Amino acid sequence: MKKSITTLMAGLLFSACAFTASAASGGKLTILVGADTTFPPFETEVNGKVSGFDIDMIQAIAKAENMQVTLKTMPFNGLIPSLQAGSIDAAVAGITIKKSRMQNVDFSDAYYKSGLSVLVKADSKIKSFADLKGHVVATKKATSSVDYMTEHGIDSRYIKQFQDIDVAYQALMTGGADAVVFDNPVNVNFKTSHKNVKIVGDLLTGEYYGIAITKKKPELVDKINAGLAKIKKSGEYHQLFVKYFGGDTRGAVKGVEKPDSVAVSG
């Protein structure tokens, strides 16, 4: 009898603690979100503080859906396996929505449209990709930008390839190249901190970033999509482009663009 009373008291104490913990968190669902912090301005880490477009976005989405985010930083190549294992619930890292990845994880609606863009000096007469013929163009070695240019009429002799994209930007700034063709968000990030350059023309290719979600919690897809729709409607989504891209909204996804026509590879 004594043992039964002790067990009952222990059970009541556990229930009380559980209720208190739930009440303290406001009954919010906590989601563990993985992030690779080596892709500014989407994710970065300085002195142990993680920040960036994706970080602010997932926090805003969670708040809109009465959820709470716990971040876990890890290398990019560890994100998908962690989602598959269920050791994290979601991941943000500028992850391209690809058919090959959709076999292993779910994705939110697209939140950023990436692709190649053309960056030139502010006083350049180059207005679009069509004007690049006959001009020296810098880019990163062995990337899709090289393939795109050679496939669209740019003589390979005019393409300067560098191991590091920062060196390509340096070539543009010092007159060693007339333009840089590279991933738009990286170009935008450079433009934000260098006022004497500009991006011209439209995006040359299209691929979409999405929030990757473990297939073990399919209910999270609807909640995250609902939160994304809410922050688009409230204007918080737009403010992220003001904060991280100087107001450049080329990458904004205005409506709901489902991952139907997504990258197959790359």
Image: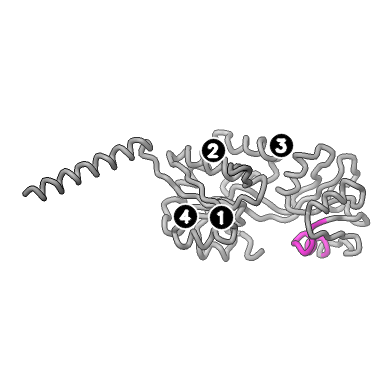
> Is the residue under label 3 in contact with that under label 2 (CB below 8 Å)?
no
Q: Residue at x 90, y 40 (%)?
A: 123
Sequence-wise first label, 2 or 3: 2
Q: Is label 3 in a helix, a strand or a loop? A: loop
Packing grade of label 1 (10 A; few <14, some 14-19, many >=20) is some
Q: Which mark is residue 246?
A: 3
Tag 4: amino acid:
Ile
Crowd rating for badge 3 (residues with CA inside 10 Å; few <14, some 14–19, many 20+): some
Q: Vertical placement of 148 versus 171: above or below?
A: below
Tell me if residue 5 comes above or below residue 24 in the rendering: below
Task: Identify residue for label 2.
Answer: 231
Residue at the (48%, 41%) spot, across then down:
62
Q: Nearer the viewer, mark 4 or mark 3?
A: 4
Q: Residue 41: x and y, percent?
A: 67, 45
Earlier-in-chain disc, 1 versus 2: 1
Q: With 29 as the anchor, is 46 left or right in this view? A: right
What amino acid is labelled 3 in the image? Gly
- Secondary structure beneath dot 4 equals loop
- How crowded pointer 2 is (Cα within 10 Å; few <14, some 14-19, many 20+) is rated as some
Q: Which residue in the structure is indicated by mark 4?
A: 88
Q: Amino acid at mark 2?
A: Ile
Q: Marks 3/1: CA distance?
A: 28 Å
Q: Check if mark 2's residue and mark 4's residue have beta carbons within 8 Å.
A: no
How many angstroms separate mark 2 from mark 3 (CA)? 19 Å
Could you give the CA–CA distance between mark 2 and mark 4, rounded to whole angstroms?
Answer: 23 Å
Picture residue at 51% right of the left edge, 41% below the top: 61
Disc 1 designates what residue?
Answer: 74
Residue 264 spot, x, y in % from top left: 63, 65
Is residue 26 at all visible to an observer of this figure?
Answer: yes
Q: Can you give x and y, in whole percent of width and height, for residue 68 in the image?
A: 45, 41
Range of residues picked out in magenta:
139-150
The C terminus is located in which quarter? bottom right
